[in-house]
Each structure stands twice: as C-alpha cells, then as structure tokens.
Image: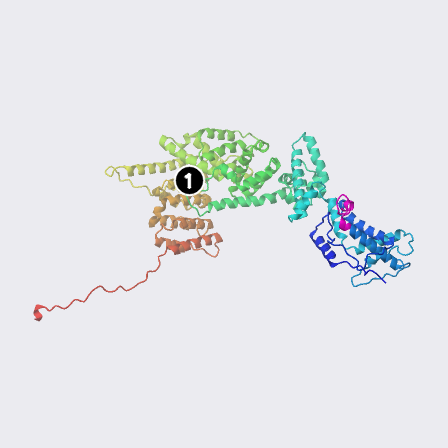
Amino acid sequence: MTLYAPFQPEPFRDSTCLRALSKGSLNPTRPAWSSAEPHRPLGPRGARGQRGSRRGTLVRRNLGAAARGPRAAGAAWGGPRGPGRELRRDRDWELDRDRDRDRESGPGTGIRAGNPTWSGPRARPGRHVRGAAGAGSGQRRGPQGDADELHGAAEGHRAVPVPSAGLLQTENGVLLPSLQYALPFLDLHGTPRLEFHQSVFDELREKLLERVSAIAVEGKVEERYKKLEDLLEKSFSLVKMPSIQPVVMCVMKHLPKVPEKKLKLVMADKDLYKACAVEVKRQIWQDNQALFGDEVSPLLKQYILEKENILFSNDISFLQNFFSPSPKTRRQGEVVQKLTQMIGKNVKLYDMVLQFLRTLFLRTRNVHYCTLRAELLMSLHDLEISDICTVDPCHKFTWCLDACIREKFVDNKRARELQGFLDGVKKGQEQVLGDLSMILCDPFAINTLALSTIRHLQDLVGQDTLPRESPDLLLLLRMLSLGQGAWDMIDSQVFKEPKMEVELITRFLPLLMSFVVDDHTFTVDQKLPSEEKGPIPYPSTIPEAFTKFLQENRIACEIGLYYILHITKQRNKNAFLRLLPALVETFSDLAFSDIFLHLLTGNLTLLSDEFALEEFCTSLFDGFFLTACSRKENVHRHVLRLLLHLHHKVAPAKLESLQKALEPTKQSGEAVKELYNQLSEKLELRKPSPAEVTETPSMELPLPTVPTPASR
C-alpha cells in the first residue's frame, strides 16, 4: 500500500512562473516559481527511498540553477554560504519521496520496462520519469538513461524558459559589475530593459560620431583619410541598418573622395540617397547632371514664385516695394542659401547652375533668373569661397555693382570702376559679356541705373549741360543698353556690345530735360504772388517724338517709364496726366510689365485724394488700365489691387462702373476671381443700410375758427 499520494504541483507554482515570464522579471536571489512553503507529502515522513531517483532530481535542480546564471548556480539562491533553509528543506523532502517511490516500484517497472503509469487528473509523464529512471535492481545506467532523465526533466519543468531568457540577457547585456545593483533599481521604477539598452546604444553612437569627426581633422591628411577609408570599408555593409546608418554616413561625409562603387550603390537606393549628407551628394551630382537638375529645379520654381508673390502683394505702399530689401537681406532667402549649400566649393556644380539659369532665361525671358545669378555669386562671396569667386570673371564687377544697388545710386568713383571692368574685356574673352549683360539685366541693377540716370538729368538741367557732355551719364546708358540686350546676346551667341543710338543722346534725353524745365517753371510760377503770376498754363500736349521713342527704343522706353514714376512720386498730377497717354503703346508693352505696374500702383497712393475727381479716374482707368485688362491678366490683377486699397477714395458712381468693367470672365484665372470677390465684399460693407421709412406724426394742431366782422 502506498504511503504517499501521487505528487501533483500546486497551481500557485505554475501561475507564479507565468507571471514572471510575462513580466520579464529575472531575480537571481529568489526564483519566481518557488513558494513560501515547500510541498509536504500526504503521509508520514519515515521511509527512505533508493538512490536511483536522486540523479534525476539533482539533474533537474542543476538545470534550473545553470539556466538562471552563475549566481544561481553558485549560491543556489541562498547567498555565498550555500543553500538557504527553504531550499534545503525542499531538497530533503524530494530525496525522501524519490526513495520511497523507487522502493515501491520494484524491479522491472518504470519507463525502462515500457510500463509507465500515471495517476491523478493532473499527473504528467515527466513527473514519473524523474523518479523511475534507474530504479529496481540498482544496475548501472548508461548514457541513454541519462538522456532520458534530461529529456524528462526538461519536459516536466515548466519554468525552464524563464531561466533560459535570463541566461541570454546575462551573456548579451552590458557586463559592468555596477549594473548588477542598478538594473534592479530600474526594474522597481518600471523602466524597461529595452529603453535602458537603447539609451546606452544611442550614447555610444554619439561618442562614435564625435570620434569620426575628430579623426577627420587630426594628424596628416593622408593618414586620417586612410583611417576613414578603412572604417568605411568595414562598416558600409551595415549602411541599411537604421541604427548604424548615421555612423556610415558620417564617415562618407568626411571623405573628400568616396569610392565610386559605393557612390553608385548610394545613388541606386532612394533611401540611402536621401539620408546621405550634402557633401556626399555633391560627389554624385558632379557626374550626374540630370540628377542635379532634378534637385535644383524645384528651388528655381520656388524662387520665381516668391518674386511674383511680392509683385502681386495686396500690401501697396510707396515706402515698401519690390526694391526695398537690401541685397544682403535678399541673399539670406531660403532658395539662395540652399543653392549655396548644394554648390559648396564645387566649381563644376556652380557652372551647372549658371547653365540652368541661362537656359531658363532664354526659354522664359524671365528677368528674375538674372537676379538669382547675381545673388548666388554674391552669396558665395559672403562666405569667402575663393575657389569659385576667383574663377568667375564677373565677380569684381558684380561686387562693385552690388554696392551701387545697396545705395541705389552709381557715384563717380564706382562708375569709373565699372567702366574699367567693361573696358578690360580682352579679345577672345568676349563670352564674358554674356554673363555681364545677364547681371546687368537684373531688375535691381536696371532700377539703380535708371534712377541714377534721372538724377543725372536733373543735375544737368541745373548745370546747363547737354547729356552728351557727361561721361557718367554715357556710362549709365552703356550699361543699360548692355543689360537690356542680354537676351538677344545670349540667344544669338554674338558677344558684342550693342551700339548706342545717337538720337537717344541728342534728342530723347534733351526732350526729357525739357519736361523737367516745364515742371520747374510751372512750380515756380505757382509760388509767385498772385499779382506777379503770368498767364502760363501747364503744357498738356505730348511731343510726338517722345511717343515715338517710347514705342521704338527700348532704352528710351525704360528711362521714360522711370521718369513717369519719378513725377508720380513727387505728386506732380499735371505732369503725370500729360504723359500718361503715351504709356498705352510702348516698346514690348513695358508699361504693362509687372515691375512697372507694381511701382506705379505704389506711387499712386500718394495721389489718393485725386481719385475723387472724375477727370483723374477717367484718364487713369479708362485711358490706361482698361485698355489692356482684357488681353493682359496681370494688368487686371494690378487694377484690382489698387482698388482694394483706394476704393474708399473713388466716387461711388465711378466705382460702380469700374466694378462692372472689371468683372472676371470665364477665362480669368483664380487669382483675378479671388481679388474681385474681395473687392465686392468690401463694397458691400460700404453700402448704407436702407433706412426704414416711417410716417412722422403731423405736428399741426387745428386752429379754432374765429368769426370775421363781416359774419357778424
């Protein structure tokens, strides 16, 4: 009769083990599956069993301790002096149970005899294997018996995976003695081990990046580049690993010449190409013009769009206009800075960008590409990139012209310097004139040259000097002619300065000077006392030669338009209305260009009070703006901009007729429709609300009838 009931594990043990496995808790000082009290047999503790089952118990015990790590295997949870009290008590009880079970089983029983018996609803095969192996006659067991015991121990011990995970963590973790006490402290605070190891990895990566950067500047050039090349060769195979990729990219960044094979691999992979530094991309771009063009093209489109947004801005002011920002401020723009960074010190990339700008200028005739050409060169000048500035023959000329643009005037000293650069173009180097003309075609350069020309003409009037006798004025006209002929020169590839027309100097400029004299004469006459005023009305006719020059000569048209801007800024209404009809037909419709209309609408705000007059509005809108609104959408937009700003000054009847005339058509763009809707909303708000008509009570009281004397 059996003195002991079949051994069944308590549910508490298994549930505790599963909780420990799910939390990842590996406490080497106490196993997660040990309960506070050891399992006791159901019968008395008296009989001693045979020794056949002790090996299975010890193997199982050693497996658990080895899997839990060296600390568990050495001290067996009880500290450095040996097993604890509870562990010893569990071990003695299991040894007694195994001996009794072996004694009862007798010879020929157990797994070896092929007659395993399991009892109880929760009994498992592994439980009987541990006690039955080698029982019976006490014969010596061979290797197969030991293997059966190991298999049974591993199959029956549910908690084996938890110590195995702990062994994996121990072998692959950070092997620092101080962490044995720090990591349990992090466990108490709920910090995952993944977060700890990730932070350690990130810190080590930062240290490695700093070391790579230090290697790039330490020692001799050949030695440090040799170290970087060796490091790149060893680490490039891990370039697609996100955690290691920054290190590989840093090594490539500091190499002046990355191996061609690795550059091709980077270029073929979109993710690697996007992740690599701009220093590496430069080495790819210089041999792949199409790829570089794809990178530059969005920036060029963005630059043109930014310029157009400024020209069509709803904020109209004569103080802040398109030409108000200084050259240095404009060079801090996003597009210019990105292009400068992309080029770096690479002369080949700089030449590619210039070629892109020339091609786009020829294709679109957009003068903003000329502005970008000058701004890009001066941005490299600000960064003192001598590798490019010294090889660009336009550098010093652009530098001097940039100073003039900053002052918005060409003084005598800088005029002589600019003339020296133009005269210094040697035979065989005429292609330089193509780049010089493109720089002079910059609207900011044209604005500076034209303003300086008007100022010189005013000075000549006071000095009683003819235009042909002023060398500075002739130089300004020479540069204006070179800038206005940039497109024709680059298109024809005939790099030769255009000839100056004699009539421009001998007839047109004196005609402008006569307008200045008329203005001075009328102004002085108005300041005289009333008794001394002469009957001199302001001239209202336009010389036919003036209109002809504006239609046929580009330089004359440019100077004439700036003179009209000048008199508008001076609030000279009479001179403005006199010359306004000549703007209907100009050379290449320059009077309807965005830059001129932007400046004109800004200056017209100074004459805001004149918009209340029917004559002024009729001359301005009906005689000039509305003549081109139907065929030029940009004119339509500028008129709407002006009315949005000055609609409260215009007479209501005139405003209503203008609103009807400016109504968009089906072919009109979204920008025009949006501006028109904004204007309509403002006009609706200005309309007075209809007053309610109420009958006022009569204040007359009936008078009593008084009998007349005749009625008596």
Q: How is the image coloured?
A: rainbow
Tag 1: residue type?
Tyr
Q: Nearer the viewer, residue 82 or 682?
A: 82
Number of marks present in the image shown: 1
Q: Nearer the viewer, residue 205 or 293?
A: 205
Where, quadrant-wise, is the N terminus in this rendering? bottom right
Looking at the rendering, which quadrant does residue 121 occupy? bottom right
Q: Nearer the viewer, residue 456 or 186?
A: 186
The residue identified by callout 1 is 562
Looking at the rendering, which quadrant does residue 124 occupy? bottom right
Q: Is residue 151 magenta?
A: no
How many other residues sit within 10 Å of disc 1, few (<14), some (14-19) or many (≥20)? some
Q: Residue at x 83, y 62 (%)?
A: 118
Q: Position of residue 140 (x, y in %)?
A: 91, 52
Q: Is residue 409 above or below residue 197?
A: above
Q: Position of residue 53 (x, y in %)?
A: 85, 54
Q: Position of residue 216 (x, y in %)?
A: 66, 34
Give the magenta-colored segment's residue range: 72-87
Q: In the rendered view, does 282 fall on the left or right side of 681?
A: right
Q: Position of residue 44 (x, y in %)?
A: 81, 58
Q: Is residue 587 above or below residue 410?
A: below
Residue 469 seen in render: yes
Q: Is residue 75 magenta?
A: yes
Which residue occupies the extreme bottom position in the image? 712
